[in-house]
Amino acid sequence: MVGSSHEALHRIFQKDPALLTRALQRVLHVPFPEPHDIAALNVDLTEIEPVERRVDTLLRAETDEGTYLLVVESQGKVDDRKRGSWPYYLSYLYEKYRCEPVLIVITQNSATARWAARPIRLGFPGWHSLTVRPLVLGPDNVPVITDERQAEQ
């Protein structure tokens, strides 16, 4: 149950939003840029309409070091919408399964591989709240198999 101490910890920033950036700058010494304007937004993050979100393949790998979710995404071309979808997938899967998700992107295109390998950083420069670093299998790092015996292996 939410109590008054919980509410007091965050509501002070609703009353004085600039206090939060001052605290980041002066107390934590985080180089947060000086805001020109701060507006309180709706705090309800509930999705009213169902949103279809599917990963291409999802595997659970049990290891001696722990359990991992292997999120495999096949990517034919650059698609900047994925820069929002992939962090969402990983966060959702972590919350649902309580084990570490690992994003693996598979592509046949070198430019797409370079694009997909770029880290997705959410937050502000110098202090990222979330960083997604996809592992990428593509034409530049996966050898072409031309031998039938090699393909069998």
Image: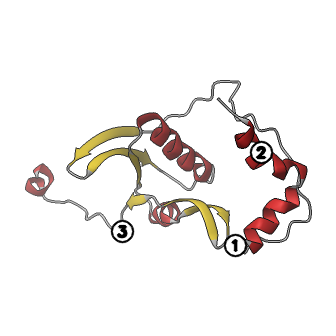
Label 1 with label 3: CB-CB less than 8 Å? no
- Residue appearing at x 28%, y 48% in the figure: 66
- Residue appearing at x 89%, y 49% in the figure: 15
- Number of the front mark, 3 or 2: 2
Residue most toward the top? 49
- Number of the front mark, 1 or 2: 2
Label 3 with label 2: CB-CB less than 8 Å? no
Residue at image mark 2: 8
Residue at image mark 3: 140
**In-front residue for pair 44/76:** 44
Residue at image mark 1: 30
Q: CA distance from mark 3 to mark 2?
A: 53 Å
Disc 1 secondary structure class: loop
Residue most toward the left? 149
Q: Residues within 10 Å of mark 1 (few under 14, many from 20)?
A: some
Apparent side of residue 120 relative to residue 76 in the rendered image (left or right): right
Label 1 with label 2: CB-CB less than 8 Å? no
Disc 2 secondary structure class: helix
Image coordinates of residue 125 in percent, x first then y, are: 67, 71
Q: Which of pointers 1 and 3 lies earlier in the amino acid sequence?
A: 1
Q: CA distance from mark 1 to mark 2?
A: 23 Å
Q: Is residue 28 above or below residue 15?
A: below
